[in-house]
Amino acid sequence: MNWIVDTPEKKVVVMTGSGISAESGIQTFRGANGLWENHRIEDVASPIAFRRDPVMVWNFYLQRRKQALGCQPNAGHLAVSALEKWVTEGGGEFLLATQNVDGLHTRAGSRNVIEMHGSLLISRCTACGEVFQDESVDWELPPHHDCPQKGLLRPHIVWFGESLFPGDMENIESAIRDCDIFIVIGTSGTVYPAAGLAHYANRLGKRTACVNKDAPANVDLFDTFIQGEAGTELPRRLFPEKRAKGNAP
Ligand code: OAD
């Protein structure tokens, strides 16, 4: 058996997409039954849509927030969290960059996580800029912040046409420059700048691996491609120690 990470004293960067949460019951974005199949992205996930109709956009995100809170991390999330524990306790370094906004990696016990596209469980005031954990699902819409300006709240999500949060890309690229292996899981490789990270790692001559149900758009960039479901493949291919509980309490 060839493990993706064979010894723990490695510097590992993992990037995940919605495919890793599919087995928890969260819809992916593209393909049959994908979330974007029933919505025009520009109607629900853009600053223009929010300016035009904040109630509609909030309804969309509250529904997704409810769904995420009702789902549990699966064996794929737990394997990633267990890998972090194994590597960091074994003298290596670990960073998880996720495009997912569902919070399931953190609930599975992952610690060093960059949520590149934000989080369904965080809101942000459009007036004072405060960012806070927010699991409320019964806001009177559209919600307003309890600040002097009573600013309109928005989901702390990176919408189409917006940049990633300051520093995130730099931190991920810096970890990739320094890493021994870059592992990509459950993403179609079509949304930039996230998809560009595989090109970046490849150009730097890093070892690259991908675990995905279907071949992603950028499959040629990976030294190893394991086709299958994350919840099945990760526990048996990611690293040689079966500690399914990972960092979970
Ligand atoms: P996509 O829907 O584009 O791709 C999901 C990928 O996961 C596909 O390649 C599937 O083959 C794969 N997949 C499905 N089930 C899987 C499983 N059980 N195990 C492993 N792989 C599986 O979703 P993302 O690539 O995450 O951005 O999409 C990237 C971004 O586009 C999202 O973060 C979101 C979206 O628009 C924003 O909202 C900003």
Image (cartoon, rainbow, N blue to C red):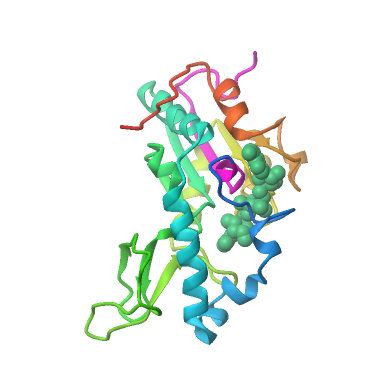
Q: From this view, report whether residue 207 is shown above or below residue 42.
A: above
Residue 97 screen position, x and y as percent: 50, 46
Q: Residue shown at 40%/28% (left/top)? A: 246
Camera-side residue of 84 and 156? 156
Give, as a single range, the part of the protein colored magenta.
1-22
Q: From this view, report whether residue 139 is shown above or below residue 214.
A: below
Instruction: Give the quadrant of the C terminus.
Output: top left
Instruction: Give the quadrant of the N terminus.
Output: top right
Q: From this view, report whether residue 5 is shown above or below residue 155.
A: above
Q: Is residue 98 magenta?
A: no
Q: From this view, report whether residue 182 is shown above or below residue 195.
A: above
Residue 248 screen position, x and y as percent: 35, 32
Q: Residue shown at 60%/53% (left/top)? A: 194
Residue 142 screen position, x and y as percent: 40, 80
Give the tally of numbered discs: 0
Camera-side residue of 176 and 15? 15
Is any part of residue 123 visible from this angle?
yes
Q: Residue furthest left?
A: 148
Location of residue 42 by image quarter? bottom right
Residue 50 screen position, x and y as percent: 51, 80
Q: Is residue 5 magenta?
A: yes
Camera-side residue of 4 and 242? 242
Residue 219 is left or right of residue 53, and the answer is right
Is any part of residue 192 visible from this angle?
no
Q: Residue shown at 49%/66% (left/top)? A: 61
Camera-side residue of 224 and 156? 156
Q: Residue shown at 47%/80% (left/top)? A: 55
Q: Residue furthest top?
A: 1
